[in-house]
Amino acid sequence: MHGIDWIILIGSMLFIVVYGVWKTRGQSNVQDFLKGNDSNWFTVGLSVMATQASAITFLSTPGQAFHDGMGFVQFYFGLPIAMVVICLVFIPLYHKLNVYTAYEFLESRFDLKTRTLTASLFLIQRGLSAGITIFAPSIILSAVLGWDLTWLNIIIGALVIIYTVSGGTKAVNVTQKQQMSIMMGGMAVAFVILVYSLPDGITFSNALEIAGASGKMDILDFSFDFDNRYTIWSGIIGGTFLSLSYFGTDQSQVQRYLSGKSVKQSQMGMIMNGFLKVPMQFFILLVGVMVFVFYQFNPSPLNFNPVAQKSIENSTYFEQYSELENENSKNFEAKKDLIFNYTTAEKSEKETLKKAIISSENKDKELREEARQIISQANPVVETNDKDYVFIHFILNHLPKGVIGLLLAMALCAAMSSTSSELNALATTTTMDLYRRNKPNQADIHYLKASKWFTLLWGVLAILFACVANLFDNLIQLVNIIGSIFYGNVLGIFLLAFFFRFVRGNSVFIAAIITQIIVIIGWKFDWMPYLWLNLFGCALVILIAVLIDLMKGGNEKSPNIEEIGK
Amino acid sequence: MNNKKNKDQKASPLGSLGGAWRESYTWVLLANAGYILVFYILMKIFS
């Protein structure tokens, strides 16, 4: 890395930490520290978006598009629907109850044990996710700089801890504005450079044609194939449930819109997210597709993971791998010629050339698969799935000085923005749902200090988890899988609270425990694609709770939500 | 309850919002449908 890259990278990080601490100095009460309560809709919207967009979003998603095309965007089609439901149902109620956490509401509606159980489920799944959020950029920097992974986890985690412990919710919100600017600016710069890197005579439209001929522009899948992870149906139905769970019941998001200065400001922030999220994800995937097109004209390694490449160089499989690389080079040259011909061909010839390109693309996939197998033989513990390394390989090898620093800052900003929201939410839930509930009637300053200590504690735990986390399949999917295991159950509990007036706390508590066990078994034995676990868990907890309540045959009604607000 | 900042939300906990709000919700859903339509057209052109 060049000196200018270091200046941009370190400068951005230090600026954000110092700005976050300075801008929120002198907070003296727990309300300011944990709630904020003075953000306008634009800050709320940006904060919600920055919280969801982690380093995984910016590094892994382009790699996903590179290998599997644009289909992943379907995952987000349910999000705008969920935004409308949250604006109409969740936000008004949370504001009216003046709660710190989403789980506080459950004690009013059901009982303490249901609140504690739901808060605990959140702490488990979000605590694990916080570790992964730190782990993702650490891998990148360790691959780039050869630094120790453990030390990188500690440095990234420590930077976030400094301003989140110091300024709480306000520090999270103010820093996310700067972070979001760097993130989107970085992606825009990468996109422009990719477009200008196309060979002479190849336009942006040609680039999309090339991507299409290689199967990367199959954006929508209308099939009812239950095994297919991303279809328009799983996106709209499963995505709506996942988004409802995430934005409606996950404290890391609830806390963002509770910081709005009024109901309307919170709602407008969420509507902004509903408008912008799908195009934003489309754009990030499009960058990945453009990276794919770029590598149709420029040679690429058989495996993008530098550690995997290195294990081959030092092994007895080196010659076998070199033969594969030679074959890959020949295939690359042949495919490049086909692509040039395809872009200038008459319509009648295009179909034949397209078939040849698909055949060449399949050959490319076969070679990469063979390479993965050889790498596994040479080093069984190395990660051969290189999706997370595609975009960073492009950044490091093909971007000019200065831009590399900007894009590394983008990845770190994304990690920091998500982690800070997570630590802030974990600390708030621990303080308000567990600590204060069991140690009431203390002075405000006592809870303020406790909140800061819990932020620090969760930060340290996240760093520890990051240090032991291992990649499997794909980082972005790992986070979504963890979410899907817990979210459906939690959402079901909230839906029972909102819409099933006759169901009481005991029934919900028992149903939630049974459901969580069944969902974990279902995931372990692969009963369904993970996205459907949201719907399954949600439906199951509602069904079991209603059945238990009917079997008990009690007539007393729980308080409804109108009564709770009084 | 701290309602001083929530003047626009008094009637119901489900949030009885004005007509303008319903319109913006409709626009979000229409925009989503629009995105899907645009993606469908892009897929048909380039795939």
Image (cartoon, coloured by chain):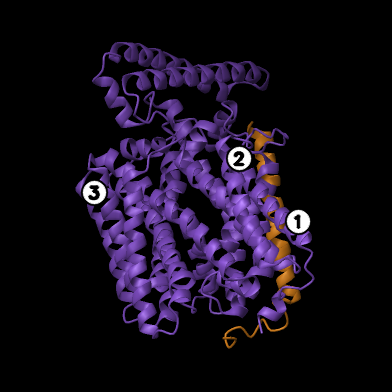
Residue A547 badge: 1
* B23 relative to A14 in the view: left or right: right
Q: Relative to residue A127, is residue A33 depicted above or below?
A: below
Q: Nearer the N terminus, badge 2 or badge 3? A: 3
Check the image and name the residue furthest to the front: A552
Total numbered labels: 3
* Chain letter, disc 1 residue: A
| Chain drawn purple in the picture | A
**Residue A471: x, y in percent?**
40, 38
Q: Residue drawn 23% across and 20% down?
A: A314
Residue A522 badge: 2
Q: Nearer the N terminus, badge 1 or badge 2? A: 2
Tell me which amino acid carries mark 3. Answer: Trp
Residue A165: tell me if it is visible: yes
Q: Residue drawn 28% across and 24% down?
A: A311
Could you give the CA–CA distance between mark 3 and mark 1, rounded to whole angstroms? 51 Å
Residue indicated by mark 3: A151
| Chain drawn orange in the picture | B
**Residue A464: x, y in percent?**
32, 51
Mark 3 burial class by Cα count in 10 Å: few <14, some 14-19, many 20+: some
Q: Residue drawn 61% across and 69% down?
A: A106
SS state under label 2: helix
**Residue A530: x, y in percent?**
59, 41
* Chain letter, disc 3 residue: A
